[in-house]
Amino acid sequence: SASSLLAAVDEWIAACKGTREALAFSWQTLAAFDSDAKEDWRQSYDPFEDGNNWRQLRRKRYATKVVKEKIAESVASRMVLFQAQQDWQRSKAVEAVAILAGDRAVLQREM
């Protein structure tokens, strides 16, 4: 019948339109991700952010954790080094004062 034929044609036209839109979306996506030089908010420049690569995600998270720990250790060791330098300079100042006091004592005894 004519009505079923028209319904089938309408369905076919809708399917063709959907296919064209899907292909256009795929083509646009391929074009957008084709080059890193093209800036696009959809691009992910981190290869480890693909949700299917869970091993790489685990490695990335572990590496990030280790880096943060090493940075914290570095800051702590710099603080220890700074304190050691301050203590050394303080002891040198105390030594200089003691030497001056000893020299004064010797001079006063000689007079």
Image (cartoon, helix red, strand yellow):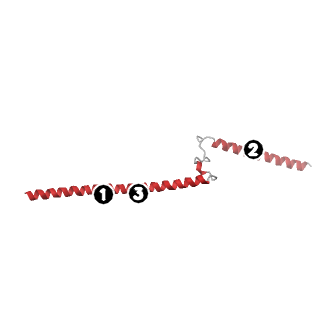
Q: Which residue lies furthest to the right in this view?
A: 1
User: What residue is shown with label 2?
Assistant: 20
Kindly indicate the quadrant of the structure image that contains residue 92.
Answer: bottom left
What is the CA distance from the residue labelled 2 to the residue labelled 3?
A: 60 Å
The residue nearer to you, when weighing 55 against 82, is: 55
User: What residue is shown with label 1?
Assistant: 87
The residue type indicated by label 2 comes to Arg
In the image, taking residue 26 as reference, residue 46 lies left or right, namely: left
Q: Residue at image x 54%, y 55%?
A: 62
Q: Residue at image x 33%, y 56%?
A: 84
Q: How crowded is mark 1: few (under 14 residues within 10 Å), some or many (20 or more)?
A: few
Label annotation for residue 72: none
Measured from the top left, where is residue 26 in percent x and y? 70, 44
* Helix, strand or loop at mark 1: helix
User: What residue is shown with label 3?
Assistant: 76
Q: Residue at image x 60%, y 45%?
A: 40
N-term-proximal mark, 2 vs 3: 2
In the image, taking residue 108 as reference, residue 64 lies left or right, namely: right
Task: Tell me: residue 110, above or below residue 8.
Answer: below
Measured from the top left, where is residue 99 in percent x and y? 19, 56
Kindly indicate the quadrant of the structure image that contains residue 105.
Answer: bottom left
Q: Residue at image x 56%, y 53%?
A: 59
N-term-proximal mark, 1 vs 2: 2
Measured from the top left, where is residue 10 in percent x and y? 83, 48
Q: Which of the two marks, 1 or 2, is nearer to us in this view?
A: 1
- Give yes or no for contact between labels 2 and 3 (Cβ–Cβ under 8 Å): no
Q: Residues within 10 Å of mark 2 (few under 14, many from 20)?
A: few
Which quadrant is home to the C terminus?
bottom left
What is the CA distance from the residue labelled 3 to the residue labelled 1?
A: 16 Å
N-term-proximal mark, 3 vs 1: 3
